[in-house]
Image: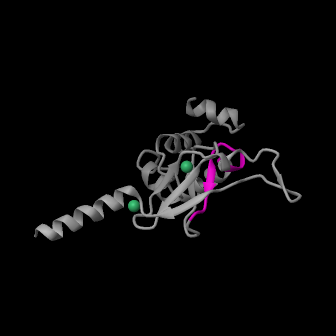
Amino acid sequence: MDVIERLQTHHVKPSVQRIAIMGYLMEHRTHPTVDEIYVALSPSIPTLSKTTVYNTLKLLSEHGAIQTLTIDGRNTCYDAVTTPHAHFLCKCCGRIYDLAPTPSDSHPGEMEREGHQIQEIHHYYKGICKQCIEEKRLNRINSLTN
Ligand SMILES: [Zn+2]
Ligand SMILES: [Zn+2]
């Protein structure tokens, strides 16, 4: 699906800025923050403001075109993947990874639990990512050989 189609599917009127922001999220599966998106796009769209980025992300999220993540409580991150999947936050480098869905990530849909209607399910895992583990391992080897 291309960017414009994706916006139209979610009843968002395509504008230059909306297309750029949605496109950025679809291309970068790194769960960027408002700041990261702003810094990446502002050179090519000089009229872009941080407020516009924030408001656009909010609109896209309200229309279900993207999902909002608040894993670490400080930063809000945005994800173009709206199908259920778990996230892994590395406490070392702060990167957020997608994890393959497990049966417990199933779509909330009309799910009900103890009389409550579930609309969102978030699975967050925290730890040290494989890249950081590898870096630590290499550092240890380097310090041994020096
Ligand atoms: Zn890491
Ligand atoms: Zn994700």
* 16 to the left or right of 95: right
Q: Residue furthest left?
A: 146
Residues drawn in magenta: 60-71
Q: Residue furthest right?
A: 115
Image quadrant of residue 134? bottom left
* Picture coordinates of residue 67, whole percent (x, y): 63, 50
* Picture coordinates of residue 2, whole percent (x, y): 56, 30
Image quarter where the N terminus lies is top right
Residue 85 in the magenta stretch? The answer is no
* 97 to the left or right of 14: left
Q: Quadrant of ligand 1?
A: bottom left
Identify the residue at image location x=65%, y=56%: 122
Whether 140 is drawn above or below 130: the answer is below
Whether 132 is drawn above or below 37: the answer is below
Identify the residue at image location x=35%, y=61%: 132
How is the model colour-coded?
one colour
* Picture coordinates of residue 9, whole percent (x, y): 69, 33
Identify the residue at image location x=10%, y=70%: 146
Whether 89 is drawn above or below 17: the answer is below
Viewer-proximal residue among 5 and 28: 28
Viewer-proximal residue among 1 and 131: 131
Viewer-proximal residue among 17 and 90: 90
Viewer-proximal residue among 70 and 135: 135
Q: How many marks?
A: 0
* 7 to the left or right of 110: left
